[in-house]
Structure formats: structure tokens, C-alpha cells
Amino acid sequence: MTVSGAATDPIILAENLCKQYDGFTAVDSISFDVQPGECFGLLGPNGAGKTSAIRMIYGFAPVSGGRLRVFGLDIETEWRQIRSRIGVCQQDNTLDPDLSVLQNLLVFAGYFRIPARKARQRAEELLHFFALEKKIEAKVGELSGGLARRLTLARALINDPELIILDEPTTGLDPQSRHQLWERLQHLRTLGKTFMLTTHYMEEAAQLCDRLMIMDHGKILIQGTPTGLIGEHIGTSIIEVGGAGPELRQFLVDRSIGFDQMGERLIVYSNGDSTVEQAIRTTFRPEQCTFRSATLEDVFLRLTGRELRE
């Protein structure tokens, strides 16, 4: 196996990365890096290019243009070595319904030519780690959605990968199952694993990611830390105003206070400005008014829009 560069070298290095399908540009000259031991988030609306980007990273889709190196290796010529060091937890349930929980892990271990005894040991360790040991002989169809996601992640770890790619790992899970999975992922991070995560849950990205980027229409809109992006693009606080009249909108325009119009509701980016907050409370007295802290979801919606998409 080819040895990667120094520990300070990026695990993933993409430079002007492109992906095209029959003339359609899904990924448009994006550049980013993922450092060892971090969780890097890739966010964006449906159709933003996220899935196309990660499919190139684990060698499923060929690169159309630009340069992509993983572990210091060229994905186009050394993808076999790269794949052996990556674990992928796909969004869809690709578990074999005809096999038991244990058999799903053992069969997958065979793809990496892991010796039978070592594969069994590794599978049992993972089932214990994800609290699935009591389901070892159960068929996949007998598992709840949360247990099936845990098994999918366990399968992605069977080869003890250095880089783990998680494509919307908690979609469809109830809050309890989602938080349980977050706890397992946080523990894996303490072991030095590197993660790349796509998710539609902004709370999940804020909880897990050291850095992230938001994409739309195949391009990168922003990159940075969750807290840094909130501070830079939104500020500290938000005021949601229902039943706002034209006088309030003019008041905000005159003072260059940012806001978005959502039907009868205004999203005011007050950034803790007490003058604005006091005026809304006492002068304009809207029907409904909510004062809250700014979140990563506010950043996402302000940059990608709030309209429904097909």
C-alpha cells in the first residue's frame, strides 16, 4: 500500500474539481481541503452538487476536471489504494435483507480480504460499539430505522478506515436515535478518525463539524467554522416578526438593517442592536415577535434562499 504524506498533509485536497453529466455541470470548479482528525461538512439544497462531489472522493464517479488527491494519492490512478482506506455510509439502505446482522458485516469484510477470524472479531467489536450485539442473528428487515442506520455505519467501519464519508447518516431517524448516533460519531472522533459529512440537519452540522462549506448550483458559496459563519453572515441574534407593516420595513431600510420577507413575516438580522429591538417592541408592536439567537440554519437559508425547489 502506498504511504500518504506527512501527518500535516490534507486527507482530501480538491483543486478546481469538476463533474459533468452529458453537458450538465453538477460540480463547478470547487476547491477545498479536509485536515486529519476533523469533521468537515458539505451542505447545500437538493441538487447543489454534494453527492456528486463525494462520489468522486470515494472513486464511484470519475473526475471530469481539476485535481483530487486523497491521502496524498491521485484518485484517478490510485483509487484502489484510496478505497481500501475509506469507509462510506451511504444515504440509502444498501444492507442485504436476506442476511443476518452479523452476516452483513462478514460479507462486506470479504470485499477487503479481511481474514475470517479477524473479520469476526472486528464485526463483534462493532456490534458491541453500536449496541447491536443482541440483534446479531436478526434479519435486517426486523431492525428499526435507527438500528439499521447503526448497522450501516458499522459496516462502513469494518475495514477500520482512516476517512469516513457520511452521506446524510441520520435522515429519517427520530431525535433519540439521531442523538445516539451523534454520540457514537463523537467517540470515533476521539480515536482520530477523519469525517466528511453531508446533512440537511443544520443542528447536526453545528454539533459535529469543525469546518464546513455550503454549496449551491455546483459552486461553493462559503467555507468556515459553524460559529464563524454565523457571526460573519448573520450576527448574534434574529428577530422574527409577524404581521409587520410597511412602516417597520422602511424603518429597517433607513437604518440599513438586513431583513428577509417571508409572506407576512419578517426575518430581521438585528445582531443584538438594542435600538432596533426596542423600536420593534414599543413603537411598531407587531402581532407576533420572537427574539432568538442566530443559528447555522439562518446562514444556510439566507445564502441559498427560502423558496421551495423541485
Image: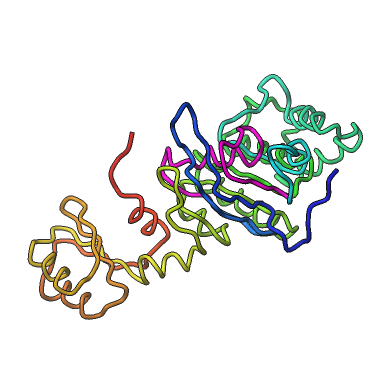
Is residue 192 or residue 214 the one in the foreground? 214
Q: Quadrant of the C terminus?
A: top left
Judged left or right of residue 47, residue 177 is right
**Residue appearing at x 56%, y 58% in the figure:** 209
Judged left or right of residue 235, residue 131 is right
Q: Quadrant of the N terminus?
A: top right
**Residue appearing at x 32%, y 38% in the figure:** 309
Does residue 226 lie above or below 117 as drawn? below
Is residue 77 or residue 43 the one in the foreground? 77
* Tag count: 0
Residue 249 is a magenta residue: no
**Residue appearing at x 31%, y 49% in the figure:** 305
Q: Quadrant of residue 84?
A: top right
Residue 185 picture location, percent across and down: 65, 52
**Residue appearing at x 8%, y 62% in the figure:** 246
Residue 177 picture location, percent across and down: 56, 45
Is residue 84 or residue 131 the one in the foreground? 84
Most extreme residue toward the bottom is 275
Q: How is the image coloured?
A: rainbow
Judged left or right of residue 279, residue 151 is right
Is residue 14 or residue 297 the one in the foreground? 14
Judged left or right of residue 209, residue 48 is left
Q: In which quarter of the image is residue 95?
A: top right
Instruction: Please state the extent of the stretch shown in magenta in the rendering.
Output: 42-71
Q: In which quarter of the image is residue 192?
A: bottom right
Residue 195 picture location, percent across and down: 64, 51
